[in-house]
Amino acid sequence: MNRTHGVGADDRPVVLADEQARAWSPAQARARFRTGLTGPTAGVAAGRTQANLICVPADWAYETLLFCQRNPQACPVLDVTDAGSATTVLAEGADLRTDLPRYRVWQHGELVDEPTDVRAYWRDDLVSFLIGCSFTFEWALAAAGVPLRHVEQGRNVPMYVTNRRCRPAGRLRGPLVVSLRPVPPEHLAAAIRESSLFPAVHGGPVHCGDPSVLGIADLGRPDHGDPVDAAPDDIPVFWACGVTLQAAVTASRPPFALTHAPGQMFLTDARDEQYRVA
Amino acid sequence: MNRTHGVGADDRPVVLADEQARAWSPAQARARFRTGLTGPTAGVAAGRTQANLICVPADWAYETLLFCQRNPQACPVLDVTDAGSATTVLAEGADLRTDLPRYRVWQHGELVDEPTDVRAYWRDDLVSFLIGCSFTFEWALAAAGVPLRHVEQGRNVPMYVTNRRCRPAGRLRGPLVVSLRPVPPEHLAAAIRESSLFPAVHGGPVHCGDPSVLGIADLGRPDHGDPVDAAPDDIPVFWACGVTLQAAVTASRPPFALTHAPGQMFLTDARDEQYRVA
């Protein structure tokens, strides 16, 4: 997508721009984004849960929620707002229209804008869905010694549209999108074990190894985010990704939708530990 | 409820009626129920996932799904059918209108019938929800050495309406309902650990100890199911229960709904292990 739609493609990772972003509170992060800071959010506000955003007209809300229920590994629902509300129980004082680094605006499945504020596009019939993000378990991976190549390299996580079809829900259908983390073989067990303990934010990987099994021809050309450099022995590990909903928008062409820009997530007040089982 | 509505209250647990019920396949269990066998299903078709059922008119489907999403510990959604369909991806060849031991029929929040077959009540606008059931993790508890008093005593699991309010969704609101398992102190850690690994089927307990914290005055008088005899040192342990949706029907009075009878669940083909993380 970044290749097709250049808007926002040169956003620098927030962590590069400000090492202190790790120590921000979620409210501090949201305030920075509200006033114009942009960039991928991996590494921001350590230990706090990040979320994908999709806002659809109310007459698409049931199918969106059902699509999420039918594809829970890709689309784990953390919160759903009442129609027209831009607030969420997951973030006190937050405004979903302004507090993300960058948004995407979709009309009939076409990406028409990537603004940093969507108040001009807001409608009173919009229902907003906050969807779990794999950035949530990255802290657990790091604590278990698993290197995170995209964080080390100051890049957005790479994401790929796969050949796997989601289970449709009414008018909504589309392919599974995955995020990639190259993992050294000696850390593979920990990466799988730790992420599996977070089923509400994508859980364990959907595939490890040969990318062609997922229909991915070239890891160097992600559909979203940045390519990352893997060490020679690294195993490509793929997790289901909330951008799956954006692929469903592209495939299903609802008249209107708002989403976050891939990798530029909403910072909730929730603690990652809340989504860890056992 | 059994005290108020006597219908079906004398159903004997299936396991008592037929020790071989543990070894039935899910299809065999469904066939028995289809031809009239009734009774609580704890212990039936070992290792296969059991589910709560609620069917609502399509114009209540979004609020029902949203209520489940907002109260995921009580109402974990395993499958949602398309309107009018009595089949589910979770059970090949099953008919949701005939294959449960006993149903409940609700009109404007009132329980009006408890038949063993709901074909006469079926409507083409009904959307069916299959909701996780704590019977699913009982095998894991048993394997970890945790005694199951209701199974030992051949009774239905006791269930209680609590003083905790669910987060409402549109017109749907109501109290949390819990199931009780008395657990010996030396098995408490295992009971919590093992059940927590099944977040899709209620996960870990919502409370351990003093029932009055949940507004339960008398463990000997459950709102659904049977009282069980606890050993003197047993700690009462409460898990969120899918009957919460029936309490929401009572409180919210949708014009029509079908549900299972408490403890008399739908047997899916899914294996319990599929819902265990890590």
Image (spheres, coloured by chain):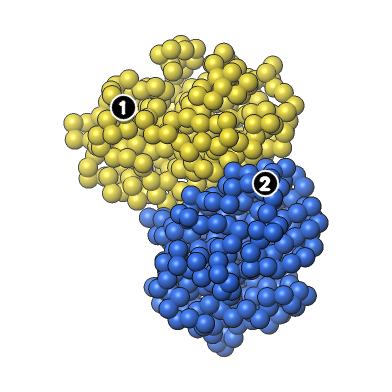
Chain colours: A yellow, B blue
Q: Nearer the viewer, residue A225 or B246?
A: B246
Q: Nearer the viewer, residue B132 or B235?
A: B132
Residue behind mark 1: A216
From the viewer's perspective, tell me whether residue A115 is left or right of residue B147.
right
Residue behind mark 2: B124
Q: Residues within 10 Å of mark 2 (few under 14, many from 20)?
A: few
Describe the element under mark 2 as helix, strand or loop.
loop
Query: Which quarter of the rendered picture does the N terminus of chain B lie within?
Result: bottom right
Q: Is residue B153 above or below residue A272?
A: below
The circle drawn on residue B84 is none
Q: Is residue A140 above or below residue A110?
A: below
Q: Is residue B16 above or below residue A143?
A: below
**Amino acid marked by disc 2:** Asp
Query: Which quarter of the rendered picture does the C terminus of chain B lie within?
Result: bottom left
Image coords of residue B170 (percent x, y) = 75, 44
From the viewer's perspective, tell me whether residue A58 is left or right of residue A23.
right
From the viewer's perspective, tell me whether residue A208 is left or right of residue B174.
left
Chain under disc 2: B
At 44% from the left edge and 57% from the top edge, which residue is drawn? B270
Q: Nearer the viewer, residue A172 or A149?
A: A172
At 22% from the left edge and 42% from the top edge, which residue is drawn? A185
At 71% from the left edge and 37% from the top edge, which residue is drawn? A82
Describe the element under mark 1 as helix, strand or loop.
loop
Q: Is residue B149 visible?
A: no
Q: CA distance from mark 2 to mark 1?
A: 42 Å
